[in-house]
Amino acid sequence: MRELRDDFPILRDRSLHYLDTAATSQHPECVLDAVRNYYETANANPHRGVYELAQRATDASDEARAAAARFLGCDDRELVFTRNATESINLVAYTWGRVNVAAGDEIAVYVAEHHSNMVPWQRLALEKGAAVRYMYPDEHGRLTEAELRRVINEKTRLVALAQVSNVLGLLAPVEKAIELAHQVGAVVMLDCAQSAPHMPLNLHELGCDFAALSGHKLYAPMGIGLLYGRFELLDAMPPFLSGGDMISSVHEYGAAWADVPRKFEAGTVDVGGQVGLRAAIEYMEKLGWEAITKHEAHLMELCLEGMAAIPGITVYGDADPRERYGVISFNVEDVHPHDVASILDADGVCIRAGHHCAQPLMDRLGIGRCCRASFGVYNTEEDVRSFLGSLKNVRSFMGYGS
Amino acid sequence: MDLRAIYNQVITENSRSKEHRHPVEGCTCSLEGVNPSCGDDITLQLRVKDGVIEDAGFLGAGCAISQASASLMIDLLKGRTVEEAKRLIDTFFKMIKGEISPEELEELEDAAALQGIAHTPARVKCAVLAWHTMEEALDK
């Protein structure tokens, strides 16, 4: 694949080695241009105005939804625009959850979930007198079929699972989880925030019930996200936020809801963000999945190989680069992750340090916190070399013999 | 960024020092200080008698800066009166805000090694954790 750095204005600064795409991605110029172009040529309140300009805004919104549906392998009407994956999951917890989860029921949650696919279920369980039951990784950081079978049972109403863990970067056995959940009449809430930037998705083929995505991890602007829901489920669910644009009619003592998906999109929506999301999707489609996955797998391999050669580094989860997507979490012996991140920062290398919104997993690994390097399409071998070069010096810099 | 302005020798050495890393016998006050965002977590223990900090120690875990800062703070404040200690804590905060005079800086002794943190906003919270915990403990 050609080098993409120059497509991304912020990365034209060659001293910057951005390895924190799992937290948020950078944006190609075409995305920034698309947002600007929308505000310069098509901005009005969509779905309301009669005039031609308002129609342009409505079309921009509809076309963005259609592009996302094509990208994810589902129908337009099954995609709800949200702010981010967190809001998408909360929407399901507040609507589907309140109607379908009762006292004595169980919600199966993988302990490696991001807090966003864990805390809403804890709150729902508390409110309803239901129980959260955790699934745990094996010693290689993998979720096994046996573990799925241990936890998913006749009482399970929902299974909360990230397709790719934002800490371990490992692919979860989602097909098996969906199969087992459906056998007991449970639904699956798939968190695709970390997987969608790195692998092609086909939600209909996968057969999941709900899926959540964040645009900002997918080269789109911050503040735009998606919820996928199977049409039958969305159609039967009560609304989430209520107010303008989510109704079909309102009387003094009642209201009727708009059709799915707009039933779930109360108030003026972020059309600029939707347009940006569409441009990001089209940018990725133009690059092509074959090129993207090949490039990212190459960087992953190069990086893991280099890290294995540095003394005092522990990588979490199976260190085999296959089935690992975009993320490497690690620690440097004796050195706190925040110090590692500060030392790398001095060389222009941006990595994340902390608990990565996955405190229960950190507790499970017995580490509390760690460092995380993550990749996007724009990263280069030079980024990996700079990271490794800086990482090599951390222990001696802090006064430890290497 | 000049990294050695933050991770100078005083700081890296103190971050590994065990001198003040212990529970305090007959302690009169034990207080936990936490940075929720990054997980620095220290428990400060004091024995204050007749308005004097007779002994102080800390337990817990965190980054080099938070640990060095706790160690340097105890070096500076142990044996002082509560009143003096509070004044020095204020002086430390002035240094972190970049509002300190050369004379005041001298009063902070080795803790002046943390002056460089003032230019690294992301790490200021690590440097001030122990001092805020001490301030709160002395007000108890």
Image (cartoon, coloured by chain):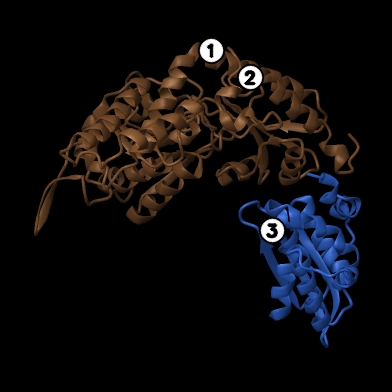
Query: Which of the labelled discs sits on residue A80, or is there none?
Result: none
2 or 1: mark nearer the eye: 1
Residue in the picture at 80% in, 81% down? B82
Specify the colour of chain A: brown
Q: How many marks?
A: 3
Q: Which residue is mark 1?
A: A291
Residue in the picture at 88% in, 50% down? B8
Type of residue at label 1? Ala
Label 2: chain? Answer: A
- Quadrant of the rendered image containing residue B52: bottom right
Q: Which residue is mark 3?
A: B125
Disc 3, disc 2: CB below 8 Å?
Answer: no
- Quadrant of the rendered image containing residue A179: top left
**Camera-side residue: A261 or B120?**
B120
Label 3: chain? Answer: B
Which quarter of the figure is the N terminus of chain A placed in? top right
* Cα gap from disc 3 to disc 2, whole angstroms: 36 Å
Q: Describe the element under mark 1 as helix, strand or loop.
A: helix
Query: Which of the labelled discs sits on residue A321, or is there none?
Result: 2
Label 1: chain? Answer: A
Type of residue at label 2? Pro
User: Where residue A374 appears, x then y in whole percent?
Assistant: 61, 30
Residue in the picture at 44% in, 34% down? A215
Q: Is residue A141 left or right of residue B115?
A: left
Q: Describe the element under mark 2 as helix, strand or loop.
A: loop
Which quarter of the figure is the C terminus of chain A placed in? top right
Q: Residues within 10 Å of mark 2 (few under 14, many from 20)?
A: many
User: Where residue A186 appears, x then y in whole percent?
Assistant: 32, 34
